[in-house]
Image (cartoon, grey):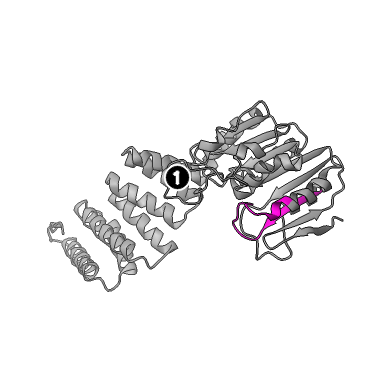
Amino acid sequence: MSISNVIFQSEHIAVVQTSGTRTDAIAVTFTPEDHRHVSPPQGFSQAYFQNLGIPSIAFVSNSDHWWQIEDMKEALAVVRSAVSAFPRVLSYGTAMGAYGALIFSSALGATEVLALAPLISRAAKDARQEAPTEMLALDRQEVGEGISQHANVLLVYDPLTRDAYHLRKIVGDHVQHLKIPLIGQNVFSFLKTNGVLDALLQDTIAGDSDLANYRDDVLQKRKLWPTYWLGLGEKASEAGRHKDAAACFERAAGLDPRYPTLLKWARSCERSGDIETAAQQYAQALLVKPGDERVTEKTVKLLLAATRTAIRNGDLDQATENAELAARIAPDNEDVKATEQRLVRIRNRESHSSLPGQAPADVQPM
């Protein structure tokens, strides 16, 4: 049975050591975000390494400080002593934790580094800032100076993200880059969900981390990841190919029907002229997240437009379906009420025209 102990604690971090049955390797991990509310302190992937019998030491942060704290000097000295008996030392993390795994790999004496989508830019969390930004640094040192020159370094990231600007500059015979375009920042979830992370971690710990074995696999598995289709859709939208964008957003919504994705699908359909689908998807978005007045207004407007189109095309069943949906969304809307009344009159005329000796009545557009 593995045992966990806090071997260092300060105002800013806790360091948790967990025992294991293996003596050939130890993992050192860094949390990707603020863990101050987790008690007792729990390290990143701590349970995973416990299940494998691999001992681990976890740096646990209590804020998004990017490890830019004086306490790290003393904590690193404690950890370096604790890992010195192991022939293989893995430094591992994602996001902010991947930054820590990189910049402290030399201080830890790491033999392997696995950094998933490192957040390495000073403004990395500001989605509004598109230009490459200054790299984070510890004690005014560049990131590259903290990376072990004696470790096998594996960087896994989306080359279209802002942080890729700095990651591409980390080079050397000991560095491998696994680039997975259009999956976004959450590489950890992508690899874990698609069954790649476990094999990648175990190969890395064993010192057999040839990323060429993974490239084709992850590129194929992107098609199962909603962020991939969202990224493709954004690219198509920027190019004015709204029908293609709508098809991509439809794939994304099929994998993960979240409110923002449904809105993107609806807007692309609207821009491509597919008012019927646009109206339906705006309505679906409201079912996921009701209460947005602007989306409600847009949905009702498009549903009524789709209703008029269906009437002109003689498809009264579709017209009725659209009008009823508009009524559920905005039951007090006067235009919706008028449309429902119009449909009742049209259906009554059709019913009367079908009687023996009656000529069909013309259905006039609204």
Residue 289 lies within the magenta run: no
Residue placed most toward the observer, 205 or 63: 63
In the image, 333: left or right of 67? left
Is label 1 in a helix, a strand or a loop? helix
x, y (%) of residue 97?
64, 49
Residue placed most toward the observer, 316 or 152: 152
Per the rendered image, the range of residues in magenta is: 55-73
Residue 56 lies within the magenta run: yes
Looking at the figure, which quarter contains the C terminus?
bottom left
Q: Residue furthest bottom?
A: 332
x, y (%) of residue 15?
75, 56
Identify the residue at image location x=33%, y=38%. Answer: 241
Residue placed most toward the observer, 315 or 263: 263
In the image, 198: left or right of 64? right
x, y (%) of residue 288?
44, 62
Instruction: Residue 300: name its quadrant.
Output: bottom left
Residue 152 seen: yes
Identify the residue at image location x=25%, y=54%. Answer: 315
